[in-house]
Image (tube, rainbow, N blue to C red):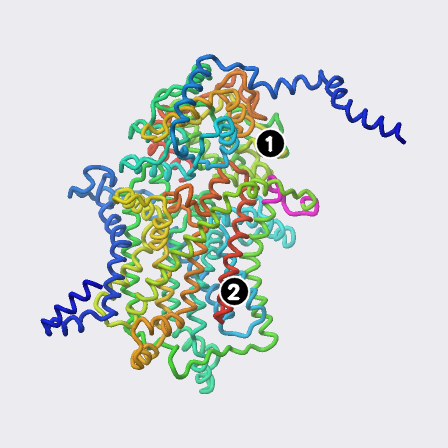
Amino acid sequence: MAGMGAAARGSLRYPGVSAWLARTLTIERVIVALLLLFLLWEIFIPLAALVFSSVKDVRPDHPDFFNLTLTLGNWDEVLSSAQLWTITRHTVVFAFGASFLALAMGGVLAFVTTRTNARLKWLIASLVLYQLAMPDVLYPVIWTFLAGPELGVLSDWWTSITGLSAPVDVYSMGGMIFVESFLLLPLVYVFMVPAMSAMDRALEESAETCGASRAHVIRDIVLKLAAPALAATLVIVLMRAWEAFEVPWFLGVREKTFTFSTELFFRTTTPPSDTGLISSFALPMLVVSLVMVWWYNRFNLKARNYAVLSGKSYKPTLMTLRPVTRWVVSGACLAVLVVGVVLPLLMLIWLSLHPFFRPPSLDALGAVQLDSYERALETPVILTGFKNSLIIGLSSSAVVLLVVSLSAWFVVHGRTRGRRMLDVLTFAPMAFPNIVVGICLLWLYLLLPIDLSGTYLVLILAYFILFVAIAARNVTVRAFQIHPELHEAAVSSGAAFLTSYRTVIVPLMGPALLASGLYITAWAFKELETTVLLASPQTKTTTVVVYDLTGLATTSEVAAVGVVAVAGLMVVIGAFQFVARKMRIVGF
Amino acid sequence: MSKVLRLTVLMVLLLPALASAGCGDDDEPSGESVDASKAIEASPEVTKQLDELEAAARKETGPIQYYFILGEEANRDLFNAFTERYPFVEFEVSGGDPFQLLEKVVSENKTGRPVADILQGGPLEDQVLNTDNDIGMAFEPAGEAEADDRVQVEGNVIVSDYFTFHTVYNTNEVSEEEAPTSLEDLTKPEWRGRFGIDLEQIDWFAGELGHYGEDEGLSLMQRLGENEPVIFAGAEGYEQVAAGALPVAVNLFSAAVVPYFEQGAPIAFAKLDHIIAQPDMYFGIKSSDVPNKVKLFLAWLFTEEAQQILSQSSFKNPTLSGVEPPPHLEGVCEDPCELFVETSEVFGDFDKRVEQFRSVFTR
């Protein structure tokens, strides 16, 4: 305040300065500047560390790290791998296959729950969202008991009924794509629901009135209006699949189907980490992410074309399906979810009820026991993990959502300088491997004069880096759909920017903010790589506690801990659903 | 009625006495077993060291920050017993894979903000902490002198117990006569595609190369790799052997496979001419704020009480003679079976071993 007073006194003496300040220091510019400052601290340091490390042959703790002796040795090591092209081919097929399959399933499910009057939409939405609770590390293992050639229950049933070999072998590339697509499904869904729910049925009705068939309406109106959402979702899901480790590790090893993530694991398995090599593996991802930002910018240039939430004509009505079709559509959706969500969950429970695997049968049903749950439930530490996950998840969600809601608005509708940089900085972290984020922050906060290591604050800042890109894309898509006239009308009526932001922009972004918050909070229960490096015994999250509980545990004991963790996370997801319904947000 | 009541009361009062008198002979062995920890007297040196360390540790404040790749649960009984005996000590445990924990402990020490007091691991940790960074604490527990010297390791490391790697077969799928008696057996055509190898046990691989010698070992591993083993990662393979989907698994971890025996899985250990032992290594960190608490714990590991817990609760092989081995592991490697200990020297260059393992089994 004292500073402002001085500035005011100064400006009285120099009217030219006063006018310049009034012109320059608009609230929008101040906010963009603050956002850029924060993002430079949060994103630029890991970004710089990533790029610089890739041309150094020593770790950051080496005295020579900061000299300017650079090397291309790490690049050479990456490119000289005899398996490079095989691994690249595997990764491309796996990532594209899983992404497109997840996009198809998630897009249809989001369309059904938000845009049609299909039956049991609440159940469809709940099952997709509950899939978020499934630990990524257990999901592929569960599928070996469902569709593996030796133990697969579904494979056995299929063979005994049809006499044919099972259609899906989880150890094949097709099986890996199939399993990964279900892990990506909730991400696609939470991206598509906000976009789908904002579409204006009136546009489709106009086309139908003009004689367009339903297929034409979907192709020419629905898909075109959904283009920014589809593109954003594809970009995010593709990059997630590219980095995926669990499915290639647990399912790919048997057929020797290695991807970049498993190759990186092998190359850097000897600690301390080879930061140069890890960074070199991550840099192509960074380049791809920058190309994606550039490519995505095409939608920014035509932002108004996608604005369906305007002050006049928006009418959120549903597509009316015939009575039989309503059930058929719901049945098909539920069949997909039974395969991808319900059966794995039942198998997880089944595994937890036997000391070692027994195929489901009446005999085996009579032999169930709860011994494995003793380990999971006798220690109160799992409750501490839940509490910490909730604190970190909700806090990091709040920070991420504040930043991305503002930056998305400025990127799409703002005219302030620096908005392109906002776009780049909020998307670049998509390319950061979690381990790089962990190591970078570990060093950064160990070197700061204030000891913050192991605190909630460090974990919240780490989660910001891990999830800002996903949330930013999701909220940006929603920002496309909001016509700027709504904000302009509020400002014309005398509202300050922040008032309009609070009362107009944030409520309209609500579905995307809620979906992103749910995703981040759920992942605060599941993220391991970065959290293990940064958490202290007091700030351990659920997944770290689960890791602690399952060190030498049998599959049954791991499954029991998994069931407890899934149940806890389902309660959290249920709370988000409750809020969504209170806010009348569809698709949850 | 009153007579019945009196007789009942008399019976209730006399029953414990009758039981102890009548069953005295039967109870004796179990009584011996329970009191075994007291039966093997700690040497005066051990007692003296523990007393001195206890007195010094009482003056220190703060918990022991314990970094352990297997997490808190794997050591819970050990910690509970120790804190019951020394209630002024607390543990705060951080879990994580070796990569993450070593990254943490090295970074903490290099930036001058050490946190970890103890790290528990194996040969890899020995190389990184002691050989590469010299941050291990020098300490020699008095009880170490009485421990099995086959598994003792030179340097700033304590070995109070060890793991073993075993070839295990499903008894419904393979009879005792058919079971392999050497790794060489598994290179034969009848075993093609019928045995599994855990991709996560590079320690076993390095141990085998150490046992056979580099060239012979690598040749054997290549022939195993050519016989189409089922490669798996971790627990999935244990389940497959227990369920009979995989007749044989070559390199199962002792502490992880014993629970399957305990639960009645139809599996058995193949009798090979050697097994690979991996020392369970405890490293005190020399920058610790509570060095005497650390030393007290490390010294206590060589007491009968700790060794019993390591053996019977954690299913690790104790190093103190006279302590009962873990259930199901007794006699698994009797003469002429050789226990081959894999140290960091045997392991050699880690990156090279990883690359060899990959090229043999994953390409």
What's the residue at 43%, 58% (across, down)? A519
Question: x%, y% of residue A211?
Answer: 46, 86
- Percent across and percent down for residue A265 are 37, 42
Secondary element under disc 1, as helix, strand or loop, is: helix
Q: Write down the quadrant of residue B261 in the picture.
A: top right
Which residue was labeled with disc 2? A578
Task: Kindly identify which numbered label has been placed on residue A534.
Answer: none
| Residue type, label 2 | Phe
Residue A396 appears left or right of B163? left
Residue A354 is one of the magenta-drawn residues: yes
Residue A485, compared with residue A40, is above or below; it is: below
Q: Position of residue A276 (x, y in %)?
A: 26, 43
Badge 2 and badge 1 both on one subunit: no
Q: Nearer the viewer, residue B255 or A397?
A: A397
Q: Nearer the viewer, mark 2 or mark 1?
A: 2
Callout 2: 10 Å neighbours few (<14), some, many (20+)? few
Residue drawn at (40%, 54%), measured in percent from left and top?
A241
Q: Secondary structure at mark 2?
A: helix
**Residue type at the position of mark 1:** Phe
Q: Which residue is mark 1?
A: B261
Q: Single out the residue that lies furthest toward the top.
A: B44
The N terminus of chain A lies in quadrant: bottom left
The answer to whether residue A432 is above or below residue A105 is above
Q: Residues within 10 Å of mark 1 (few under 14, many from 20)?
A: some
Q: Is residue A274 left or right of residue B147?
A: left
Q: How many marks?
A: 2
Q: Position of residue B108 (x, y in %)?
A: 31, 37
Q: Main secondary structure of the magenta part?
A: loop
- State yes or no: residue B82 in magenta: no
The Cα atoms of the two marked residues, 2 and 1, are separated by 46 Å
Which residue is farthest bottom?
A210
Q: Which residues are magenta?
A: A352-364
